[in-house]
Image (tube, helix red, strand yellow):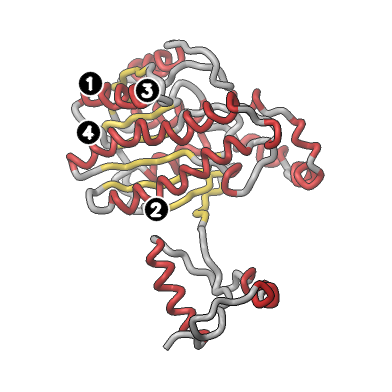
Amino acid sequence: MTEIRFDNRVAIVTGAGNGLGRSYALELARRGAKVIVNDLGGSSSGQGASPGAADRVVDEIRAAGGEAVASHDSVATREGGAAIVQTALDSFGQVDILISNAGFLRNSRFEDLTDAQIDPILDVHLKAAFYVGQPAYRAMRARNYGRMLFTGSASAMFGHAWQANYAAGKGGLMGLSHVVAIEGSAYGIQSNLLLPTAVSRLADEMDTGYTEIPMFAEAIGQAEFGVVGSRTVPEFNTSLALYLVSEACSATHGIYSSNAGRYARVRICAGEGWHATRGDAPPSLEDVAAHFAEIEDSSRPAEPMTVYDEIVEVTASGRRAGVFD
């Protein structure tokens, strides 16, 4: 098996001072990448700042013979994002890889979330992906090569009580990654979304008050944490993350789950559905109600890559249904 290397590649990893980001940065450097280790050094709830987290990871990389530079800029401002990318350009002359990973939690009930809990979460998860991603994309486009990996969450894809703010930010990254993948296809840039599962310092922000929701408490009760626990450390996510940003990977426009050593593509699909009767008259509410079981049916899924691919599929399934010539 050929070793996958990152020699002559420059990678930016945000939130690289701890947890997932630290693991990504260390392994990228071990495999030859020059790494910008970005971390503001705040708490797991986004409070404060300290250069120590990023500096320690840089020291680890250099002690092992690798190349790395620390960035202490905030991903949550346009100026900070530009400064992170400029650090890479000033230090190593290029940007090849961006792993957008920085984040924190401020959990509460949906009905109780305040602007102080909503805005900073959207800033650091969603808007930061623009603030760092846009200048990184421009640098990649100039060299006709790039790999972007956005850190999503199963909380957005599947749902987690008391995380409406976090899920909204992470869910937005799915749409962003899809569009970057489409636009980037003209310039050698690939983009994917990773849904990692890891027990990290963010677990300190997990208020178990969400067990007040009976169906959610039942789901938690069925999860066998004791079985998978040893496989939920950050390092179990690293291999898939790094493969997705490697030259060896040709996949783009994807969503990938990494959970306790199980790696799988997550698909957004549309079923065959139900077509309104032939002609130009829209269906009634009662028509929709009568055919809702067909609308719900997912036995014949299609996976459009663009909104226009969906139209192609709608036309094809409409012909199968006899509503189009």
Q: Nearer the viewer, mark 4 or mark 1?
A: 1
Does residue 195 appear left or right of residue 207 in this picture? left
Horizontal and vertical percent for residue 33? 29, 31
Q: Return the residue at label 4.
A: 8
Quadrant assignment, res 167: top right
Q: How crowded is mark 4: few (under 14 residues within 10 Å), some or many (20 or more)?
A: few
Q: Return the residue at label 2.
A: 253
Question: Mark 3 or mark 2, which is nearer the start of the sequence?
Answer: 3
Q: Return the residue at label 1.
A: 91
The disc labelled 1 sits on which kind of residue?
Ser
Count up the numbered dots: 4
Q: Distance between the residues labelled 1 and 2?
A: 30 Å
Q: Are marks 1 and 3 in contact (CB under 8 Å)?
A: no
Q: Residues within 10 Å of mark 1 (few under 14, many from 20)?
A: some
Question: Mark 3 or mark 1, which is nearer the start of the sequence?
Answer: 3
Compared to residue 41, the image places residue 101 above or below, namely: below
The disc labelled 2 sits on which kind of residue?
His
Q: Distance between the residues labelled 2 and 4?
A: 25 Å
Question: Mark 4 or mark 2, which is nearer the start of the sequence?
Answer: 4
Q: Return the residue at label 3.
A: 37
Which residue is at 51% across, 17% downward?
42
